[in-house]
Amino acid sequence: QEQLVESGGGLVQPGGSLRLSCAASGRGFGIYAMGWYRQAPGKQRELVATISIRTGRNYADSVKGRFIISRDNAKNTVYLQMNSLKPEDTAVYYCTRYSGSEPITPGVWGQGTQVTVSS
């Protein structure tokens, strides 16, 4: 059974950086599109970034130029490098493996990791 485990969250000051990791179990990791979402208190879960062979890397407008999504298929891991963090980036960040090679339908979800940006 596929499982995703996020790590790397924490408390950081505005302007700081964090790198989130999402380790996947199971087989065939490299063929699936992967993504990061986030959910702030009282708000809906929103898409942050996706990565796939078919569509490349895509970002929400709110994080373009600050966040970078990447993957290491040999390690079954996807990363989210977050730079120039702002208080509005505070949220629980979730990793997802989409059901196919394009980022259309999220399938498996991780448990989430908290990111807090505060002075």
Image (spheres, rainbow, N blue to C red):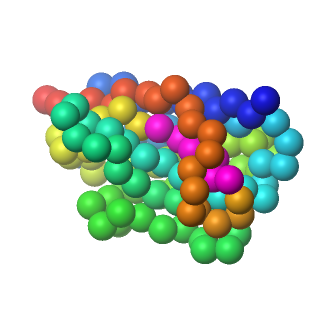
Q: Give how far across and how far down residue 2 sits, in percent.
A: 74, 34
Give the residue drawn at x 26%, y 37%. 40
Give the residue drawn at x 78%, y 59%. 31
Position above or below: 104 against 28: below
Give the residue drawn at x 43%, y 46%. 37
Q: Is residue 56 left or right of residue 42?
A: right
Q: Quadrant of the C terminus?
A: top left
- Residue 44, image quadrant: top left
Q: Is residue 105 left or right of residue 94?
A: right
**Residue 119 showing in the rendered view:** yes
Give the residue drawn at x 19%, y 34%. 42
Is residue 38 within the magenta segment?
Answer: no
Please, what is the dominant secondary structure of the magenta stretch?
A: strand
Q: Is residue 116 left or right of residue 60?
A: left
**Residue 51 showing in the rendered view:** no
Q: Give how far across and how far down residue 27 sits, in percent.
A: 85, 42
